[in-house]
Image (cartoon, rainbow, N blue to C red):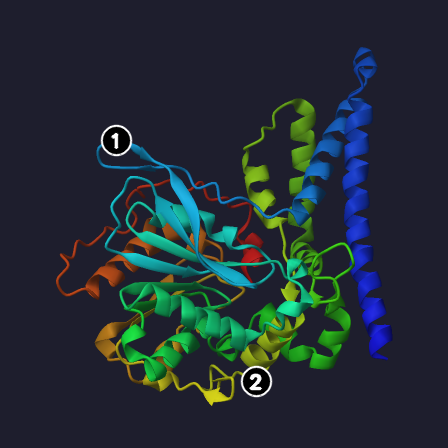
Amino acid sequence: MATYKGLRGIISYDAMETIRNTNEWMGASARALASYPAFAMIPNPLFKLMSAWGRVTERSFSRMVIKPDWEIPPIVSEDGQDHIVYVEPVIERPFGDLVHFCVARREPMARKILLVAPMSGHYATLLRTTVTSLLPDCEVYVTDWHNARDIPVSCGKFDIEDYTQYLVDFIRHLGPDVNVIAVCQPAPLALAATALLAEEDPKAQPRSLILIGGPIDPDAARTEVTDFGNRITMGELDYLMIQQVGFKYRGAGRMVYPGLAQLSSFIAMNAETHAKAFLDKVFAEARGQASEGDKHNTFYDEYLAVMDMTAEFYLSTVERIFKEREIAQNRFAVNGKPVDLGKISNVAVMTVEGANDDISAPGQCVAALDLCTGVPASRKTQHLEPGAGHYGIFAGKSWRLNIRPLVLDFIDEQVPSAPHRKRRRGGAAPVDCGAINLSEQDSKIAV
């Protein structure tokens, strides 16, 4: 039976890759055929449309298997000089690295931030605009998770307990002056990692913990995501979603939740929006009005780039975070050791939610404050951003103009000797990150 399931999984995995590869080939063929110089003498718009469809299709399907580059722009200093940003690995592990965005010829900044990127089907580059907005004022580190299909089976498993231990090691390495910002999915695990440090190595606790749109208590507010988690059984989830990496990749034989399956779910949730965006792009290409760096390409180059998650990580997230609510009920354990969130005492905690967030609805994230019983009320705060969806609270206009200044003020308040300069909400951001807002519903990219 196990052999049959494994064979079925490989066939399914390779079938999805075959479909993707075929569509990419069809797009390239249409582009090449319709762009043949002789057809330029035929005054028929069909050839321009065919070429445009081919270009858009080829690019769309080719992006699905390519990890995006960070492409962080240079940081402009007060004296007007441009400082190039380098991405340097600090800790390298099989399933993810701790990377540092090193700004050339600049002294280290006083604020040290660890951005915990979600492992939810997209790469850590999803936080590119968040990193760009923070770099002028902070030393920024990010958890850069790896695509499970490229990790050999010999590297072992990786579930939410392993994820939590990675965070513990990363925070301990950066030191007690680090400020942790966890975005969406890792929020409950960042909370657990902080609690582990509070009990095992209190001096290594981060200075502050900012949780943005995370499912600390998924039952606090119902969404389509929580309804799905409660409706489906773990057996159904395992059978329908888990597949085995094919022989094309280094991780051949590893059981994963495929990124292409996740992407299909994302697109299905807003099929009309994405279909319209695709057609609009085709016509723009045919009219010669499209460009390499336009909003469509900027958005979809990131949106379509997906990665596989290990099966044990995906299944344990659904079962333990959403179904069993182990974090919400303070009964999470790592390697058999109970994690008591009440042990957190010397860490300032802030939660950020979006009023229109349909992924982690208001109430889910702020539940962390009640769980941190050891943190004084004076060191806990919450913010609900009016009109903001899921994507906007960490990378959109709401983040740049309102949330980012509040987060930096909160970080500064935890340093008694630092001068506190309040930032005005709604003022101009120092860096325009060029956030794309095709639709707030497209925030599904950060589930």
Is 198 displayed left or right of 155 in the figure? left
Residue pushed farthest front? 154
Determine whether the residue tagged by mark 2 lies in a helix, strand or loop.
Answer: loop
Is 332 displayed left or right of 147 in the figure? left
Could you say which quadrant of the image residue 268 lies in? bottom right
Relative depth, front residue between 365 and 356: 365
- Location of the N terminus by quadrant is bottom right
Q: Residue at x 26, y 31 (%)?
A: 80
> Amino acid under label 2?
Glu
Could you say which quadrant of the image residue 410 lies in? bottom left
Q: Which residue is mark 1?
A: 80
Percent from the top left, x then y, of residue 395? 44, 51
Is 68 displayed left or right of 149 in the figure? left
Residue pushed farthest top? 41
Q: Residue at x 28, y 45 (%)?
A: 427
Q: Determine whether 74 is above or below 447 in the image.
A: above
- Location of the C terminus by quadrant is bottom right
Percent from the top left, x then y, of residue 27? 77, 36
Compare marks 1 and 2 and give the one earlier in the sequence.
1
Q: Residue at x 28, y 52 (%)?
A: 425
Give the number of the disc on residue 324: 2
